[in-house]
Image (cartoon, rainbow, N blue to C red):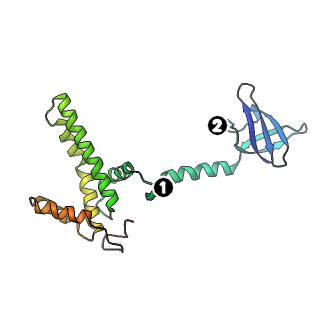
Amino acid sequence: MQGKILDFSIQNNTGIISGGDQKRYQFIGAEWKEQRQPQRGMAVDFDIDAEGKAIGVYAALTNTASANNIIQQLHEKNEAQYSPFDWFLKCIKSYVNFTGRARRQEYWYFILFYLIGAIATMVLDYIFGTEVLFYALYLIGMALPQTGVSVRRLHDTGKSGWWYLISLVPIIGVILLIIWFVKEGDAHSNLYGQPAK
């Protein structure tokens, strides 16, 4: 029979189930067949003995399936639900990904947290009097993620990632890159994949 746990007392090791037939059934902790503790509201499957008590109480399979769905949804968070820091983490996790496309939001949130981290490491260097030790380590550690997201951002605008090397040209190269990074990405598929949005 299917039902829901109305109450379970750890101290008394007893509980009450509301069955699908709208009757209440008592059960003892020894009849609980799962590893996790029974909780109020949990959907269960059980049998009834001759005395009208619940025996062989198991968590219902639908409960387990919904828990798996919740876990899956957490792992497959929709980009529309990303916080600014989620965009930064996405770039860090795909730090050597130089293929595909990155939308403006992904790029600029990465740059925001990149700059915050750079300022924080400069402050640490000042506090500890270490010249540029923390800052240099930070720049080395962030070189690949920063290059990867920049290349993917250029791909979104239809440009090859090799155009990132134009930043080596003083002033003009950096200005040109900023213009490309601010520009809206291609709304259609291009040589580098589907639109990032």
Say left or right for 109 vs 122: right
Residue 52 position in % (x across, y down): 88, 39
In which quadrant of the rendered view does residue 4 lie?
top right
The residue closer to the viewer here, 68 or 18, is 18
Residue 174 position in % (x across, y down): 15, 60
Direction top: furthest residue: 11
State whether residue 134 is above or below residue 186.
above
SS at circle 2: loop
Residue 70 position in % (x across, y down): 56, 50
Three-letter residue code for mark 1: Glu
State whether residue 98 is above or below residue 51.
below
- Residue 165 visible in the current orientation: no
The residue closer to the viewer here, 87 or 69, is 87
State whether residue 183 is above or below residue 145.
below
Residue 74 position in % (x across, y down): 50, 50
Three-letter residue code for mark 2: Arg
Which residue corresponds to the image point at 19% horizontal and 62% vertical from the top-left? 177
- Mark 1: give few (<14), some (14-19) or many (20+) Cα within 10 Å: few
State the quadrant of the C terminus.
bottom left
Disc on the earlier residue, 1 or 2? 2
Between disc 1 and disc 2, the foreground one is 1
Residue identified by numbered label 1: 76
Which residue corresponds to the image point at 26% horizontal and 42% vertical from the top-left? 117
Residue identified by numbered label 2: 36
Say left or right for 59 vs 185: right
- Residue 114 visible in the current orientation: yes
